[in-house]
């Protein structure tokens, strides 16, 4: 077998960590986007959507600069840990979070915005705090959107290439992911190995998406029952 | 325990041409206060402002001395802390929770045992005890209305807002729910603002009515005082009546709840009728509409009737329309009267026959004459 299982395991680990962090970060951010009346909100929405249209190399370049030893963040990190953020697994996680941000936040925000405002109003008139309303009404009624966002984030991180290459480089066991491995195999004219790994990634992603969408088939109705 | 809700609101909606503004002030004592008006009059916006869901531009909302909103002192108590129960028009029951979980929703501050007792007793009071474990989608329309009321009332609100909560129900179900609501409030005695556009509901609930048009209060008082002003006649209203006459108020009889009106039609004589009492002065010009099917015919002078109008006349013509007979009767003015073939045959009704028309006071619908 010429599949690089180490790279595969690393990729799954990266995707799981990024999905978990984006669930935690994405919920409040999406909630703010869905319910804020701030007039400049669209700027925030545009920033969140940027990774969809930017070439991964551009995003990766800026992340690299931001994490490097010349940026305040990079210097702070070096001062605390003794090594740079770039070309580490942590750096990869940070880059991937930015890269997959819209894939989590947009489905979250869309499903929050689709909830009947009357249900939220009803919760308030029944004495519930905004936090209780969020966890007892908004989140349960947004389960399909939350699942979609997390699955997209996971799949998107599994397959990312440009940002990883820019930020992480190609260090086996640290930053070498499946897509980098495939690229390397093709560069070395090792088509059989590239094929095996590609097929594995294809089947794995398809299986994950199928299971999740299959389980998610009968969602709650979002509106109030009349 | 008696508390009074004070509401004073000003709010501007939209700009320039589609601008609409809310500008009103009223007090609601314990018991029902009905906000009556056509759709778009601003009734729901009033409830939204009182509950804190909508922010007025200026105003004052208070329950006795407890100020919930006041622009001059910058007080704005958040909705969740106002203790105002609000049953929305579309109920807004939580679709992902069971009936029991919906009702328990507003009781999170209580211990589990207390929660259970409170829920059980309110389920009982609103006759939905058997539904606890069902999803909202699995209960009927009338039951949902009861669940929505129970969910709000279980929190022991200081004021209750009801936005046409019974609009979708049939009359019998509606009457039962209203009676349950009345008995609940007999024990609690809180102000209830009840929004409706239905005159029937106003009379069924009627303690005090505030009539609202285009964001302003046009009149307030008892249902009789507010609603029995003659209504502006419209093409649609006129279309339904076979008999429409010009009329002049001859005298008002407040002690009898009636008025005497003289009905007349062009080129005919006139006849005096007793009509429902409205706020009108002697000499007021009105129109009276009477459905042909609301008129009874007798061939001897009838006695011992509750109907106030028994009028002698002669049948001018008879005409069969499918299974209905339409007769024209001259009793000073010509009235169209409908009855069945069986009635015609049993009473041997024919042209020229002397008859007595029997018309209830409330079958005479009064309308404002268009100027």
Image (cartoon, coloured by chain):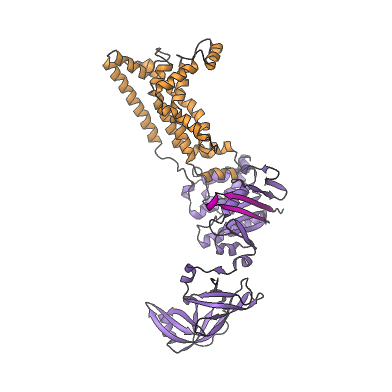
Chain colours: A orange, B purple
The residue furthest front is B16
- As for residue B50 lying within the magenta part, the answer is no
* Image quarter of residue A7: top left
- As for residue B13 lying within the magenta part, the answer is yes
- Location of the N terminus of chain A (image quadrant): top left
Q: Main secondary structure of the magenta part?
A: strand
The residue furthest top is A82
- Residue B108 seen in this snapshot: yes
Residue A212 percent across, percent down from the top left: 39, 32
Q: Is residue B233 above or below residue A106?
A: below
Residue A151 percent across, percent down from the top left: 41, 30
Q: Is residue B200 above or below residue A164?
A: below
Residue drawn at the location 51% of the way across and 88% of the way down: B300
- Residue B128 seen in this snapshot: no
Q: Nearer the viewer, residue B168 or B264?
A: B264
Residue A118 percent across, percent down from the top left: 53, 46
Residue drawn at the location 39% of the way across and 82% of the way down: B319
Q: Is residue B270 above or below residue A53?
A: below
* Residue A87 horizontal side relative to residue A122, left or right: left
Residue B345 percent across, percent down from the top left: 41, 85
The residue segment tinted magenta is B1-28
Q: Nearer the viewer, residue B181 or B122?
A: B181
Q: Is residue A201 above or below residue B130?
A: above
* Image quarter of residue B321: bottom left
Residue drawn at the location 51% of the way across and 49% of the way down: B131
């Amino acid at each position: 077998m010429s599949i690089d299982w180490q790279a595969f395991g690393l990729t799954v680990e990266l995707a799981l960590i990024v999905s978990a962090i984006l669930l935690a970060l994405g919920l409040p951010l999406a909630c703010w986007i869905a319910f804020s009346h701030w007039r400049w909100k669209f700027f925030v929405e545009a920033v969140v959507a940027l990774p969809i249209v930017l070439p991964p190399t551009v995003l990766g370049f800026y992340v690299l600069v931001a994490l490097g030893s010349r940026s305040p963040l990079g210097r702070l990190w070096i001062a605390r840990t003794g090594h740079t953020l770039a070309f580490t697994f942590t750096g990869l996680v940070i880059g991937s979070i930015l890269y997959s941000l819209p894939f989590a936040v947009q489905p979250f925000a869309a499903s929050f915005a689709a909830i009947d405002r009357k249900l939220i109003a009803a919760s308030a008139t029944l004495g519930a705090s905004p936090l209780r309303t969020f966890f007892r009404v908004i989140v349960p009624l947004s389960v399909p959107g939350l699942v979609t966002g997390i699955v997209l984030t996971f799949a998107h991180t599994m397959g990312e290439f440009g940002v990883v290459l820019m930020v992480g480089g190609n260090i086996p066991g640290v930053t070498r992911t499946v897509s980098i491995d495939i690229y390397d195999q093709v560069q070395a004219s090792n088509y059989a190995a590239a094929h095996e790994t590609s097929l594995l990634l294809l089947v794995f992603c398809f299986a994950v998406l199928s299971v999740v969408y299959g389980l998610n088939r009968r969602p709650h109705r979002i509106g109030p029952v009349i | 325990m008696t508390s009074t809700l004070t509401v004073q609101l000003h709010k501007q909606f939209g700009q320039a041409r589609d601008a609409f503004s809310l500008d009103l002030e009223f007090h609601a004592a314990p018991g029902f206060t009905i906000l009556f008006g056509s759709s778009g009059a601003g009734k729901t916006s009033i409830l939204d402002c009182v509950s804190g869901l909508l922010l007025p531009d200026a105003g004052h909302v208070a329950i006795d001395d407890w100020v919930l909103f006041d622009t001059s002192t910058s007080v704005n108590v958040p909705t969740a802390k106002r203790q105002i129960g609000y049953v929305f028009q579309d109920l807004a029951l939580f679709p992902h929770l069971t009936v029991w979980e919906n009702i328990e929703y507003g009781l999170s501050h209580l211990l589990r045992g207390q929660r259970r007792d409170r829920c059980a007793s309110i389920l009982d009071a609103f006759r939905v005890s058997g539904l606890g474990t069902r999803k909202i989608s699995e209960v009927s329309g009338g039951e949902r209305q009861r669940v929505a009321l129970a969910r709000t009332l279980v929190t022991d609100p200081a004021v209750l807002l009801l936005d046409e909560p019974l609009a979708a129900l049939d009359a019998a179900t509606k009457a039962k729910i209203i009676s349950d609501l009345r008995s609940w409030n007999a024990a609690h005695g809180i102000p209830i603002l009840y929004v409706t556009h239905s005159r029937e509901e106003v009379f069924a609930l009627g303690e005090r009515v505030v009539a609202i048009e285009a964001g302003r209060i046009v009149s307030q008082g008892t249902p009789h005082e507010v609603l029995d002003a003659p209504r502006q006649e419209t093409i649609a209203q006129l279309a339904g009546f076979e008999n429409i006459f010009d009329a002049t108020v001859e005298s008002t009889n407040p002690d009898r709840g009636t008025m005497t009106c003289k009905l007349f039609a062009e080129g005919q004589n006139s006849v005096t009728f007793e009509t429902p009492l409205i706020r009108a002065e002697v000499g007021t010009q009105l129109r009276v509409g009477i459905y042909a099917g609301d008129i009874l015919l007798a061939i001897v002078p009838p006695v011992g009737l509750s109907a106030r109008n028994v009028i002698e006349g002669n049948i001018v013509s008879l005409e069969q329309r499918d299974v209905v007979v339409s007769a024209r009767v001259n009793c000073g003015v010509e009235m169209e009267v409908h009855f069945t073939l069986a009635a015609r045959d049993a009473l041997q009704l024919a042209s020229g026959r002397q008859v007595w028309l029997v018309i209830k006071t409330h079958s005479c619908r009064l309308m404002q004459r268009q100027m």
